[in-house]
Image (cartoon, rainbow, N blue to C red):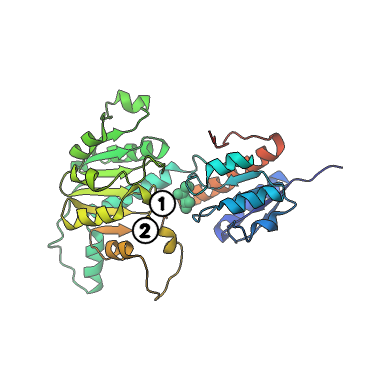
Amino acid sequence: MYHQMKMMMYGVRDDERPFIEQWQEQNHIDVQLTDQLLTEETVDQARGYDGIVAFQQLSYSNRMLQRMTEIGIYNLSLRNVGVDNIDLKQVAKLGIKLTNVPVYSPEAIAEFTVTQLMQLLRRTKEYTQKFEKHDFRWAPQISKELNQQTVGVIGTGHIGQCAIRIFQGFGAKVIAYDKFHNPELERQGLYVDTLDELYCQATVITLHIPLFPSTQHMIDATAIAKMNPGVIILNAARGQLIDEQALIDGLDRGIIGGAALDVMEDEIKVFNRNLGDQKIDYPEFNNLFSRDNVLISPHTAFYTDVAVRNMVEVSLNNNRQLIETGTADNLISTD
Ligand code: COI
């Protein structure tokens, strides 16, 4: 008998629903929605479905993956790009086919990064605090200009390239580091050969690379010691790229002049939650959050209408392709 394809979608937010409904109407495929995250406790709800579409910052546990295969589901499509919260060895071992959305809106992340840099350069956090007390004087918050900065872009994939275009539009000098060289950026002569060169020249450093074991804590005390005094660090990639204690020491010693963090090492303790008056049990967060020259945002760089639409549509298309063909254009390689 003809089998009608069915998908189960976890972690659904209200802002995603209109895009999901539109996709369902166009594709005539049944998608069951839940706002619950995909865990060992919730995975059984997908029994009888052909594929799972998920989105969460929480790690996908190995026991959940195991259980998924026990109930006969091998197709898992993530609505985001990063796959650092899922054990790819386990995915491969269990024969799960995993997809992501590799490019949903690099502009969203790049524009947010530049916004945060502008806020740091123009010292808006300090001004807002003064204005709240009806102190409308200019001084002493004299600012810096972006066109005077040398911006070191680490990672020149889709997001890094967008960021570079915007920084150049403001007249900043851009230098870049990546293991893989983009031919157009190479032609422009933007690449430095080593991170040390970038650290030594940049007045602003922005991270646009994935989290791998090799990139974990790449910004540590040793790296910071090589940087220009007063350097600004921007991170809208992954929290674990930066050793937060080393960042705090660098700020205390004035080597680091400011930071904008859209991601943090232990962010799931705080981000995307309404904590009200609760005490926050995360000393590095509390320290950094209290500083005038540090901006913290709760992993919101991705959160735009364009990005959310693409995350929904592409992940559903990926899951459909997996179910229909056993593979997908956005299949994650697990070798
Ligand atoms: C990603 O797409 O990997 C992101 O960082 C978005 C996030 C909210 C999971």
> As shown in the figure, which amino acid type bears the numbered disc 2?
Ser
Report whether residue 37 is seen: yes
User: Crowding near pointer 1: few (<14 within 10 Å), some, many (20+)?
Assistant: many
Mark 2 — residue?
297
Image: 149 above or below 183: below
User: Crowding near pointer 2: few (<14 within 10 Å), some, many (20+)?
Assistant: some
Secondary structure of residue under mark 2: loop
Mark 1 — residue?
301
Check the image and name the residue furthest to the right: 1
Q: Do the residues under discs 1 and 2 have CB atoms within 8 angstroms?
A: yes
Depth check, front residue: 248 or 289: 248
- Gap in Å between the C-alphas at discs 1 and 2? 8 Å
Q: Residue at the spot x=40%, y=47% of the render?
A: 109
Image: 28 above or below 327: below
Q: Position of residue 285 (x, y in %)?
A: 33, 62
> As shown in the figure, which amino acid type bears the numbered disc 1?
Ala
Q: Residue at the spot x=50%, y=39% of the render?
A: 102
Marking on residue 136: none
Q: Position of residue 73 (x, y in %)?
A: 69, 47
Q: Say which quarter of the image contains residue 287.
A: bottom left
